[in-house]
Amino acid sequence: MQYKKLGSTDLSISPIIFGGNVFGWTLNEKESFAILDLMFDMGIQTIDTADVYSRWAPGNEGGESESILGKWMKERGNRNDLIICTKVGMDMGQGKIDLSKSHIRASVEDSLRRLQTDYIDLYYSHKDDETTTPKETLSVYQELMDEGKVRFVGASNFSVDRLKESEQIAAEHGLPKYQVVQPEYNLLSRNSFEGELQNYCKQHQLGVASYFSLASGLLSGKYRNEKDLENSSRTDYVKKHWNADTKKLLMVLEDIANHQQTTSAAIALAWVMHQPGISAPIASATKEEHLQAFKDAIQMELSKEELRKLNEMSTF
C-alpha cells in the first residue's frame, strides 16, 4: 500500500482515510472494534473523526466516536502507528458554531481525554465561525502546537475567501497556516471543490481530504429504487440527490464495476482518488465486505475512457 505526504506536512497518510462517524452511531462499540481491527490489518492507519460525532443520534451527547476510538487504541497499544484527525467547532451544546479560544481550549482537552492520547495529528476547524476572527482561532492553535497537543491544523467547509484571509493573517502574525482542507466531494457533488478551491489548494500545496466520498452510500450501489431509500440512516441526504440523472450515473458506475470485476463503491472511490489535488478520500465502512471496496479502489487504475464516462455523467 502506497502512503503519501498530506500536502506540505510530514503526515504519511493512507490512500483512503477511514471515516469514524459510524462509531457509536451505526456501529456499537463491539462492532466498531471489529471493523477497526480489519481496517488496521489491511494497512489503513489514518482515521478521521470529530468531537460532534455522533451527537445527532438519539441518546448521544457527542464524543462517542472519539471515545470508542480511544478505547480501541488503548487496548491495542497502537496509537503511535496511527494518524488521528479530529475536529472542533460544531455545536456541542453551546448553541452555535464556535472557534473561539475558550471553546477550542476546552474542546481539545475533551478530545484528548476521550481519545486517550496526549496529541492530535491533525486538528480541523470543523466549520467557519464568522463571529470569531481568524487571528483568535489561529493564535490558540499556535499555543496548542507549542504545547505538543496538536501537530497540524486544517479547515473543513471553508470558503476560498476565508482560507485566503486566514493565510494572510497567519503570515502577518507568524501563526500556523491551515495545511489541509476538507471539502465535500464526490461524483454527485463536484462544485464545492472543483474550480477555485481546487486551484487554490494546488497553488498553495494544501492537502485535500474529501468527505462524503460515497455520497452517504448513494454511490455504493445499494440503492436501486425508492424502497431502498426508506431503509437508509441518511434518508434526507440520499433523497436530496435521488433523481433521474443520479440513476443514470449509477448505471454507468455499475457497468464500469462489472467490467473491472469490482463494486460501484470501489469505482466511485477510485474516481475521487484520480482527481487532481486530492490527497485521499474519506470513506466509512460498517461491514467487512465494504473494506474490499477500499482494497479494490487502492489497487485500481481507471482508463481514460472510464474517467471520461464518469466525468460526463456526473456534470449535472
Image (cartoon, rainbow, N blue to C red):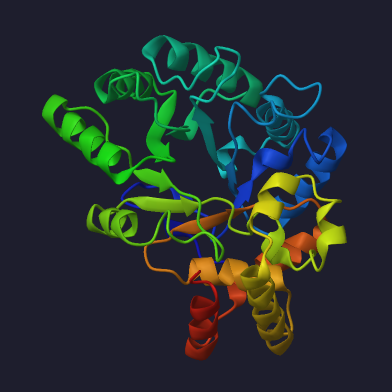
Total marks in image: 0
Q: Is residue 302 visible in this depiction of the protein? A: no
**Would you place residue 114 above or below residue 316 in this image?**
above
Given residues 13 and 301, the one toward you in this image is: 301
Name which quarter of the figure residue 70 lies in. top right
Given residues 133 and 30, the one toward you in this image is: 133
User: Residue 86: image x %, image y %?
Assistant: 54, 33
Residue depicted at x 70% and y 30%: 54
Residue sitting at the far left: 172
User: Residue 66: image x %, image y %?
Assistant: 65, 29
Q: Give the left or right position of residue 50, taking residue 89 as reference.
A: right
Name which quarter of the figure residue 143 lies in. top left
Q: Give the left or right position of residue 56, taking residue 193 as reference.
A: right
Task: Give the quadrant of the N terminus.
Answer: bottom right
Q: Is residue 291 visible in this depiction of the protein? A: yes
Name which quarter of the figure residue 171 lies in. top left
Residue depicted at x 84% and y 35%: 28
Residue depicted at x 66% and y 84%: 256
Given residues 144 and 275, the one toward you in this image is: 275
User: Residue 120: image x %, image y %?
Assistant: 49, 30
Residue sitting at the far front: 244
User: Residue 20: image x %, image y %?
Assistant: 66, 41
